[in-house]
Amino acid sequence: MAWAGGYHDLGELGRQDAHGNVTLLGRARELIIRGGQNIAPAEIEELIAQHPDVQEVAVIAIPEPTLGEIACACVVRRSGSRLTGDDVLAFLRTQRIATFKLPERIAFFEALPILAAGHKVDRLALKNAISNGAS
């Protein structure tokens, strides 16, 4: 974060449409760069969150030797759900998401770790859990 042009730059990414509406896509540091293609985790999270069996979701970048990074969707199922990774991918395909944005990995959690401030997902803890073999 730094001051730029009289404003404090938070590193937020966004897109402006023809009507001047701005859609925030997330922070630049959370951007997933998969084989040279940029993936905004918030876009995928928004779509997965619409699935009726998903309680909570966070999408993170995990290292991959060939592509650099790949997307991993960390999902908390609703109580009693038997949602699978294949179900999530099938749902995303119905949402007309670009193929390169489909998560290569889907991991299920009982709950997502939260930062000490209490309102944001601890993405570093998720990356550590994935690298240590979380489902």
Image (cartoon, rainbow, N blue to C red):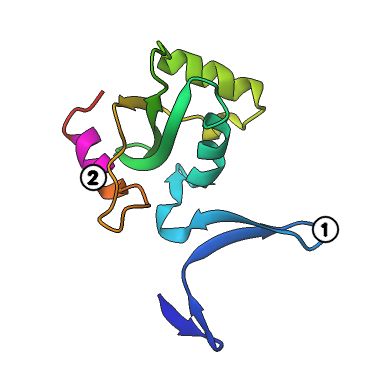
- In the figure, residue 52 lies in which quadrant? top right
- In the figure, residue 62 lies in which quadrant? top left
Dominant secondary structure, magenta: helix
**In the image, 60: left or right of 116?**
right
The residue lying toward the viewer, choosing from 127 and 75, is 75
Does residue 68 appear anywhere in the picture? no
**In the image, 65: left or right of 52?**
left
Q: Give the label on residue 125, or none.
A: 2
> Magenta residues?
126-131
**Quadrant containing the C terminus in the rendered view:** top left
Few, some or many residues within 10 Å of mark 2 (<14, 14–19, 20+): some
Most extreme residue toward the left is 132
Q: Is residue 34 magenta?
A: no
> How far across and down, in percent of the image, does residue 112 sit?
31, 37
Does residue 109 appear anywhere in the picture? yes
> In the rendered image of this protein, does residue 84 appear above or below residue 107?
above
Viewer-nearest of labels 2 and 1?
Answer: 2
Q: Give the label on residue 18, or none.
A: 1
